[in-house]
Image (cartoon, rainbow, N blue to C red):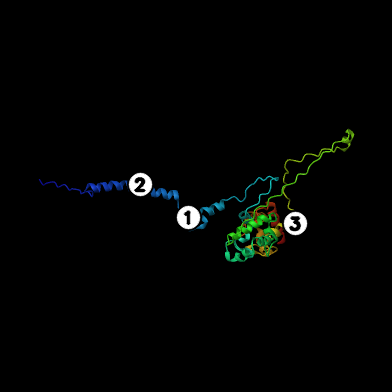
Amino acid sequence: MSDVQIEEHSSPIKTPKQLIVVVLLAFLVPITLIVMLSQLVTTGIDAGKDNPALTESAIAQRLKPVGKVEVIDPNAPKVEKSGKEVVEAVCGACHTAGLLGAPKIGDKALWAPHVKMGLEHLTQNAIKGVKQMPPRGGNPDLSDVEIGRAIAYMANQSGANFKEPEAKAAPAAKAEPVTAAAPTSAAATQTTAAPAAPAAPAAAVATPDKAGPNKGKAIYESTCVVCHGAGIAGAPKAGDKAAWAPRLKTGIDTLYASALKGKGAMPPKGGNQTLGDADVKAAVDYLAGMAK
């Protein structure tokens, strides 16, 4: 009989040291892969690196509510806004993009000659209106202090070092002494006694201001004229029937929505957040009427 030959299979692991290395790698490699996958899942991919519209701040800005409800006590004293709040609500409509010759916020070269005039001079110009900027930026409810704060806020981001004006303390009311005269007789008391006045309600209920025939014109002249008066930044010029024709075809409700929420370069409510919805609609009605 021929001898049976058995082939021997050689193992790549020939020494105890190689065995230890293989065992360690069998544990370390899977653990490393698991850690890398978990970091990829938890951190995610930075989609905004190549597309600024997908950054977290941009998404949060788009998801921000159009408006908010504030309960205000009509008897409470007015709290003056900071410069940043005024700029975001009113001044930013032109100064953010540099429309109508307004010096763009952050442009030190454009602001340099204005800064040399001083904060007081710039504040007076803003209060009275200068060139194409309406008085108080188109918002007559802004106080002198709020205007000054807005100027300081914009100028300080453009190379100035102004101090924001502080609110002036209201003078204390002088209490007048009350003297009570004693009646001379019971009859005199009966003849001179006046009937008691009805008690005033605890708080007056604010009623919405109905848009009168001239309300839309007044709002247009105080706010909308900045862009619609000259047809700036793509805004259809007031009275230009050709420019307004395609917009009028979309319907008045569509025009209302665009004015309230903003469209293109136009910010919500024309940049004046103090306007009520009825006020904005009145201005739209006025502009639409001029184009018919």
Identify the amino acid type marked 2. Answer: Ile
Q: Which residue is mark 2?
A: 31
Q: Is residue 259 left or right of residue 174?
A: left
Secondary structure found at label 2: helix
219 in relation to 109, above or below = above
Label 3 SS: loop
Image location of residue 106, percent across then percent down: 57, 61
Q: Is residue 231 left or right of residue 38?
A: right
Residue bearing mark 1: 47
In-front residue for pair 73/245: 73
Nearest to the observer: residue 136 or residue 62: 136
Image position, residue 236 (x, y; %): 66, 62
Give the CA separation, mark 3 to mark 1.
50 Å
Separation (CA) of disc 2 from disc 3 = 75 Å
All told, the count of numbered labels is 3
Seen in the picture, residue 180 relative to 147 is either above or below; the reply is above
Circle 3 crowding by C-alpha within 10 Å: few under 14, some 14–19, many from 20: few
Lower sequence index among marks 1 and 2: 2
- Residue 214 badge: 3
Amino acid beneath label 3: Asn
Q: Does the rendering let one see residue 278?
A: yes
Residue 48: x percent and y percent?
49, 56
Residue 261 in which image quadrant: bottom right
